[in-house]
Image: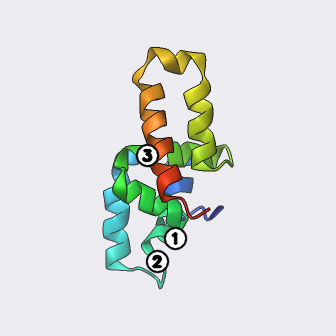
């Protein structure tokens, strides 16, 4: 997992310095000066997380939480899916959909 660059979007979200909604601002900053980095690196994501986010933007909060908890996104989603409280909300269905998509697009 790509981790621990305090100057990336994911770590800034974890630190409470930026909101998820500010990702477009980070992308604009990257376009202005990429510093030789790929966009996914600049944002603090690995390629699989980035491609998942591009395909399913609603996965972004789960990517940030997975980084915060030092877990893979799919592991986090499976945990959420199994929580009894998730059965009472849309989170369980959303987690199922995201897990299914990730499994079908996973390199591993």
Percent position (x, y) of residue 45?
53, 62
- Say which residue appears at 63% left-offset and 33% top-offset: 79
Which secondary structure lies at badge 1?
Answer: helix
Identify residue for label 3.
59
Q: Which quadrant is home to the C terminus?
A: bottom right
Q: Are marks 2 and 1 in contact (CB under 8 Å)?
A: yes
Please name which of the two marks, 1 or 3, marks the residue nearer to the observer: 3
Q: Is residue 98 left or right of residue 82?
A: left
Percent across and percent down for residue 92 are: 48, 26
Q: Mark 2 points at which residue?
A: 38
Identify the mark at residue 103; answer none if there is no mark. none
In screen coordinates, is 27 left or right of 46? left
Q: Vertically, is 1 above or below 32? A: above
The residue sitting at 61% across, 40% down in the picture is 76
Image quadrant where residue 19 sits: top left
Residue under label 1, please give it. 41
Residue situated in front as seen by the camera: 82 or 46 = 82
Residue 19 in sight: no
Q: Are marks 1 and 3 in contact (CB under 8 Å)?
A: no
Seen as rendered, the residue at the extreme right is 70
Comes first in the chain, label 2 or label 3: 2
């Amino acid at each position: 997992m790509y981790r621990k660059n305090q100057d990336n979007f994911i770590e800034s979200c974890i630190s409470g310095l930026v909101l998820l909604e500010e990702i477009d601002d980070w992308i604009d900053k990257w376009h202005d000066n990429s510093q030789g980095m790929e966009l996914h690196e600049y944002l603090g994501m690995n390629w699989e997380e980035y491609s998942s986010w591009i395909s399913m933007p609603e996965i972004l909060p789960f990517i940030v939480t997975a980084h915060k908890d030092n877990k893979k996104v799919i592991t986090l989603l499976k945990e959420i899916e199994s929580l009894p409280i998730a059965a009472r909300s849309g989170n369980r269905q959303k987690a199922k959909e995201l897990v299914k998509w990730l499994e079908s697009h996973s390199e591993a």
